[in-house]
Image (cartoon, coloured by chain):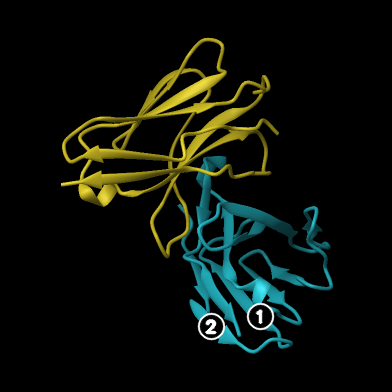
């Protein structure tokens, strides 16, 4: 299955600033997905990122707050903009597994906003 | 997307078989059932996927009755390292919605 490298693994940021999270996959994939997992909660899909097109956002998430780039088939970034303490979460990227068999997830970025 | 319902938490002891049942009454004809495992500070890990009857791999078994309105993940002889959150997902295509999951705690 694909191997995902996600950076940074954790960060502490000041409110009002922005953080860009990188997701690198060791193989070419059509779709990449970004999730948020708030402390003690399940995962919530933020958006789907396709190479060469605008990301598709889920209800409650907007491009101005979570801009996504997908410059090629192995890389994507998620930016958390104008952060507030409510943005403190784990952010994870994922891709469809080999032969469309389940999903592979990165290890996540633990973000704390102070 | 079909909604899933799982127990919030379960306790077990090392060496026991653990069965976690997931209800998905509104499962659609084309939906598959997939289970993930998540350890603290890690992303979810794919465990097993099935459509009907029984599926078994080196990690677990998945039992799906004929009406497909529920499924049971079976973990044989659990160890302390199986302490994790287990998620049941139902759907087709590329949109994955996670439910609340079941927090399994394995005791010595």
User: From where the camera sits, is residue B105 visible?
Assistant: yes
Q: Nearer the viewer, residue B80 or A55?
A: B80
- Lateral position of residue B28 relative to residue A57, left or right: left
Chain coloured cyan: A
Residue A47 lies, with reference to residue B16, above or below; the image says below
Residue at 56% in and 32% down: B5
Q: Nearer the viewer, residue B15 or A53?
A: B15
Q: Chain of mark 1?
A: A
Mark 1: few, some, or many residues within 10 Å (few <14, many ≥20)?
some
Residue at 47% in and 58% down: B43
For marks 2 and 1, give the CA distance.
Answer: 11 Å
Residue at 52% in and 40% down: A101
> Disc count in the image?
2
Residue A1 image offset from top left, x and y in percent: 45, 52
Residue where numbered disc 1 is placed: A20
Mark 2: few, some, or many residues within 10 Å (few <14, many ≥20)?
few
Kind of element beneath mark 1: strand
Discs 2 and 1 lie in a common subunit: yes
Mark 2 vs mark 1, foreground winner is 2
Kind of element beneath mark 2: strand
The image's mark for residue A11 is 2
Residue at 50% in and 18% down: B52
Chain coloured yellow: B
Q: Chain of mark 2?
A: A
């Amino acid at each position: 299955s694909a191997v995902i490298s996600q950076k940074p693994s954790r960060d502490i940021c000041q409110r009002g600033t922005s953080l860009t999270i990188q997701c690198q996959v060791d193989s070419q994939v059509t779709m990449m997905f970004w999730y948020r997992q708030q402390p003690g909660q399940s995962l919530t899909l933020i958006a789907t990122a396709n190479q060469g097109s605008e990301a598709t956002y889920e209800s409650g998430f907007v491009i101005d707050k979570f801009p996504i780039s997908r410059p090629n088939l192995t890389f994507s970034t998620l930016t958390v903009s104008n952060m507030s303490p409510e943005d403190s979460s784990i952010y994870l990227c994922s891709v469809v597994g080999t032969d469309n068999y389940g999903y592979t997830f990165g290890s996540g970025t633990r973000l704390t906003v102070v | 997307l079909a909604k899933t319902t799982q127990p919030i938490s379960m306790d077990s002891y090392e060496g026991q078989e653990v069965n976690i049942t997931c209800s998905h009454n509104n499962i659609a004809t084309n939906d598959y059932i997939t289970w993930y495992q998540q350890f603290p500070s890690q992303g979810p890990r794919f465990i097993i996927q099935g459509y009907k009857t029984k599926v078994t791999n080196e990690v677990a078994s998945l039992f799906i009755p004929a009406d497909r309105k529920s499924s049971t993940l079976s973990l044989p002889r659990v160890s302390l390292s199986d302490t994790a959150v287990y998620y049941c997902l139902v759907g087709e295509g590329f949109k994955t919605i996670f439910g609340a999951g079941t927090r399994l705690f394995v005791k010595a």
